[in-house]
DNA sequence: CTGTTAGCGCCTTCAA
DNA sequence: TTGAAGGCGCTAACAG
């Protein structure tokens, strides 16, 4: 962006208003903020000039003078393999968090500074985070891929709250989801309610903490049910394609599972599609479950049984914590874990609720 | 948010670095921005101090000094009736636009300032827009509900581009979608390919410009096909519930239509669900079509035939226009219309592509 | 009730 | 190659 060849667009300043109204800048400021008593007549005159000139106080100058930006930053760290289906999935995920953040910010009326994807040529991820931090009063960072040490360093300069799937960083506030309880419920539902006994697991990317947590919880839960066992497993990347690949493996396997537990919804969607294409009925012949509860799951056919990630509440809590810390940097650090919960729909074999 | 009872969190300033490194602030500034020649030894020393102190230039101060914020604002004007299904629909809509904006911003690396929902007690919508405008170099406003006059006034102070469904505001840049071509294709597809002849239209909210445009285009297109006619119509609000209500009317109507054209996807989803619940097969007994191509449409069963709104490109183009105007405020104003296009899937009666 | 006066932290000529 | 100094626009004491 160049220096502006066209005509200069000059906004009136506080001084312009003051001069025009024949008062001091302090008075104008008082009028603008409706504080400190000003004579009604003066107020009216100033207001008229403001209206006439179309004066709006400059945000940067205000931030500077009151040493507060009144903006909080939201940074999605995109570190999953680029071929992941983020193009579709990542959206919903962040979007829900965003809504939560917005709702926590509503009473204050602060806007959100959203970091775009990190530009190519301009320094590393940490510098990028730093630049963001210089424009806000606090930072909300989603996903847990930036090394803990750096985050802690960042947190020393500006209030930071991490919104994570499963990570737990010492010395900084974290709001995370607890996948274990949800996964336990899911496995037990499949086994006890539907009598499934040969479960197949489709994993997420190995470098994703929550994928690890989900797999761990799955195996753990499965271990608690003597009547059931692991029929097999596939690697995956949280993408619809992963589900399709997995199904091919499943169909070629010596032993056919009676339930496919997927590490996320996208994977489950791919699996269901492929299963049907192969003539296998879902859920009659095979249960399929997802994880995340991306909102389209309810609209699928069959509606997807899954585990709900409280993304919205995650965003909301994280933002509240952040605001608390901005108000009082001395607060002790906390880690909150919101638990994911089973959402029973039809892909597990349960009857339609309609 | 209170003044901070805890220990003050003081960030080092340019002065701290300068003093510590034994140079002037000008030199530090030069080093930070890698411009203006500085002796290598000096550079190294300054860099060390910066690293040691963890110095990061303050965003507000920079904005102020260089008279540029390097941030663009995105404002979703939420004016549709609150009972509309925005909770679910609005999301996807804005989200796609957001991606487009992000991609246009990627080369610059500028973040996006996202206006939250307008807080209750703090002035009217216009004042809220003004406050946003004071924090950015340019404003992208989605939806076309704010009166044109005010927008023009705002545009006089700060570069503004309107992202609209159908509105056309003189004196300011607009990027809009042209729904007509898509609707024409859709109607003609239904009639010519599937031999439908009794179409039922489910409308959107009367105060939405794009709802009006869609209905107009629909009636217009229908008029061009002598063999087909309007079997009836229902009011609606762009919500799934609207589709369900419409279907009840349809089932009670004296004459049964053979196709239901909905003003948006949500409505179509509701219609399909209700139709099925009543035992009517879609698309065998009745074609149902949507409008928008919210991305979940492809995953429904049957996959939804609809008209694609180029939301992402809308965001991208709008942002590009905005950046152009920021670079050169003297540019003539333009209105770009990107046309919506038919997306044939299965709910119209076409065979599965799989 | 109102005006004066320092900054806030950084950038940027202009000199040296 | 470096330093000095004046703003950028607003706020917030502190005096009147």
Image (tube, coloured by chain):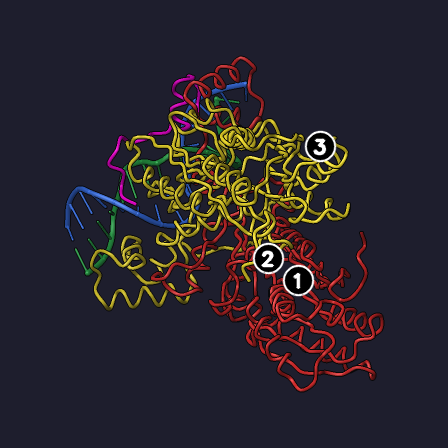
Chain colours: A red, B yellow, C blue, D green
Residue furthest to the top in view is A41
Q: Residue B149, relative to residue B270: is it above or below?
A: above
* Mark 2 belongs to chain: A
| Residue at 52% from the left image edge and 28% from the top image edge | B223
Task: Give a yes or no on whether discs 3 and 1 share a subunit.
Answer: no
* Mark 1 belongs to chain: A
Task: Give a yes or no on whether discs 3 and 2 share a subunit.
Answer: no
SS at mark 3? loop
Residue hosting label 2: A93
**Residue B216 pos. (x, y %):** 53, 28
Q: Is residue B71 within the magenta segment?
A: no
Q: Residue A304, relative to residue A259: is it above or below?
A: above
Q: Alpha-carbon distance for marks 2 and 1?
A: 9 Å
Residue B144 appears in the picture as rendered: no
State which quadrant residue A1 falls in.
top left
Q: Residues within 10 Å of mark 3 (few under 14, many from 20)?
A: few
Q: Is residue A7 within the magenta segment?
A: yes
Q: Alpha-carbon distance for marks 3 and 2?
A: 44 Å
* Mark 3 belongs to chain: B
Q: Nearer the viewer, residue B79 or B297?
A: B297
Q: Alpha-carbon distance for marks 3 and 1?
A: 44 Å
| Residue at 46% from the left image edge and 20% from the top image edge | A51
The region drawn magenta spans A1-24
User: Where residue B255 is drawn, which disc sits there?
Assistant: 3
Is B262 placed left or right of A24 in the picture?
A: right
User: Where residue A292 is drawn, which disc sits there?
Assistant: 1
**Residue A190 pos. (x, y %):** 79, 71
Magenta segment, principal secondary structure? Answer: loop
Q: Are marks 2 and 1 in contact (CB under 8 Å)?
A: yes
Residue furthest to the right in view is A192
């Amino acid at each position: 962006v160049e220096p502006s060849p066209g005509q200069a667009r000059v906004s009136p300043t506080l001084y312009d208003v003051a001069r025009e109204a024949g008062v001091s800048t302090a008075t104008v400021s008082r009028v603008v903020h409706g504080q400190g008593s000003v004579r009604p007549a003066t107020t009216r005159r100033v207001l008229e000039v403001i209206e006439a000139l179309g004066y709006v106080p400059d945000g940067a100058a205000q931030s500077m003078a009151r040493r507060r930006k009144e903006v909080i930053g939201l940074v999605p760290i995109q570190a999953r393999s680029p071929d992941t289906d983020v193009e579709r999935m990542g959206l919903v995920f962040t979007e829900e968090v965003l809504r939560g953040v917005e709702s926590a910010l509503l009473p204050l009326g602060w806007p959100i500074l959203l970091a775009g994807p990190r530009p190519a040529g301009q320094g590393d991820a940490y510098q990028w985070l730093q630049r963001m931090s210089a424009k806000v009063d606090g930072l909300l960072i989603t996903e847990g891929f930036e090394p803990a040490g750096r985050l802690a360093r960042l947190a020393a300069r500006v209030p930071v709250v991490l919104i994570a799937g499963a990570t737990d960083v010492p010395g900084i506030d974290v709001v995370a989801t607890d996948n274990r309880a949800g996964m336990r419920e899911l496995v037990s539902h499949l086994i006890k309610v539907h009598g499934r006994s040969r479960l197949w697991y489709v994993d997420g990317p190995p470098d994703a903490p929550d994928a690890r947590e989900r797999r761990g919880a799955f195996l753990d839960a499965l271990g608690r049910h003597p009547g059931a066992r692991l029929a097999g497993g596939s690697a995956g990347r949280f993408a619809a394609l992963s589900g399709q690949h997995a199904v091919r493996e499943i169909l070629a396997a010596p032993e056919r599972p009676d339930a496919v537990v997927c590490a996320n919804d996208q994977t489950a969607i791919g699996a269901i599609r492929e299963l049907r294409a192969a003539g296998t009925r879902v859920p009659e012949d095979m249960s399929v479950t997802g994880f995340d509860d991306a909102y389209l799951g309810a609209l699928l056919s069959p509606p997807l049984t899954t585990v709900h990630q409280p993304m919205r509440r995650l965003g909301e809590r994280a933002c509240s914590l952040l605001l608390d810390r901005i108000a009082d940097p001395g607060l002790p650090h906390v880690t909150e874990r919101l638990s994911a919960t089973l959402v029973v729909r039809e892909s597990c074999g349960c009857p339609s609720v309609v």
